[in-house]
Amino acid sequence: LTSVAPSMVLSGSSAVLSISGRMFDMYPEGLVCYFGTTTSTSKVTVISDSRGACRLPPFITSGRWRMQLKAEKGPAMPDALDVLVLSPPRLLHMHPSLGPQRGATPVRITVLDEYFDTDADYQCRFGSLLTLAHKNSNDSYTCFSPSSYTPQTVGFAFEPEGFSSGEET
C-alpha cells in the first residue's frame, strides 16, 4: 500500500477511501479493508492493478486506525496505512446568533471537547461561506462572520477544516 485518500474522515460518514498500491488484481477471491484489530471490515472494489476503494464502516469510532488489506481467504498484506477518524464536534453554545450585514462579527463557539479532536483545525460554515475557526481553548473557538449582500438567515456549522458534515444548526 502506498496511499489512502482521504486520510482523515468523519466518523459515521461512510466515506469512500481510495487506496493506491500494487497487485490489487492478484486476489481473485477478493480483498477486504481491515481497521485496527477490530472485526470492522469493508469489501474492496478493485479499480485497477494499482487502485482500489473501500467504504469506512459506519460504526468505526474516532481515533487513528491502521488500515490493512486482506485477502478474503488468506493473510493480510504486510503494509498498513493510518486513517484518522474524527467525531463531529457537539456545539454547546454559540454567541451572538445574529450580526450586521457587513460581517466581521466575532462569533464565539463552545463545544464538548471530549467528542472531537482538539488538535485538528476547524472552520465555521455560514450558509455556503467558510471562515477559519480560531482556537481560544480546547472547548472554545471564535469565527468571524462573512459579509452578506442581502439581509438573510443562514445555516451554521462548525466542522473540521476541509470537511463538510452537512449538518447545520
Image: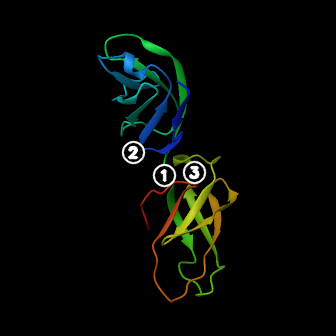
Give the residue displayed 29% in from the left and 16% down from the top: 29
Q: Farthest residue to the front: give it.
A: 48
Residue type, numbered disc 3: Asp
Lower sequence index among marks 2 and 3: 2
| Residue matched to label 2 | 12
Pick whichever of labels 1 and 2 is earlier in the sequence.
2
The correct choice, above or below, for 169 with respect to 5 in the image is: below
Q: Residue at x 58, y 87 (%)?
A: 101
Residue that lies at the very extreme toward the top in this rendered image:
74
Where disc 1 sits, the SS reads: loop
Question: Would you say the residues marked 3 and 1 are in contact, meaning their CB atoms lie under 8 Å apart?
Answer: no
**Residue type pointed to by label 2:** Gly
- Left or right: 127, with 55 as reference point: right
The three-letter code of the residue at mark 1 reads Pro
Tell me the colour scheme of the image: rainbow
SS at badge 3 = helix
Q: For the view shown, which residue lies furthest in the left direction?
A: 29
First in sequence: mark 3 vs mark 1: 1
Residue that badge 1 annotates:
88
**Between residues 91 and 121, which one lies in front from this camera angle?**
121
> Residue 161 location in percent, x, y?
58, 55
Whether residue 49 is situated above or below residue 110 in the rendered picture: above
Residue 54, image x and y in percent?
A: 38, 34
Task: Return the residue at label 3.
Answer: 113
Viewer-nearest residue: 152 or 69: 69
Q: Nearer the viewer, mark 2 or mark 3?
A: 2
Determine the CA span between mark 2 and mark 3: 18 Å
> In what quadrant of the picture does the C terminus appear?
bottom left
Residue 60, position as x, y percentages in the image: 41, 36
- SS for tag 2? loop
Query: Are discs 1 and 2 less than 8 Å apart at CB?
Result: yes
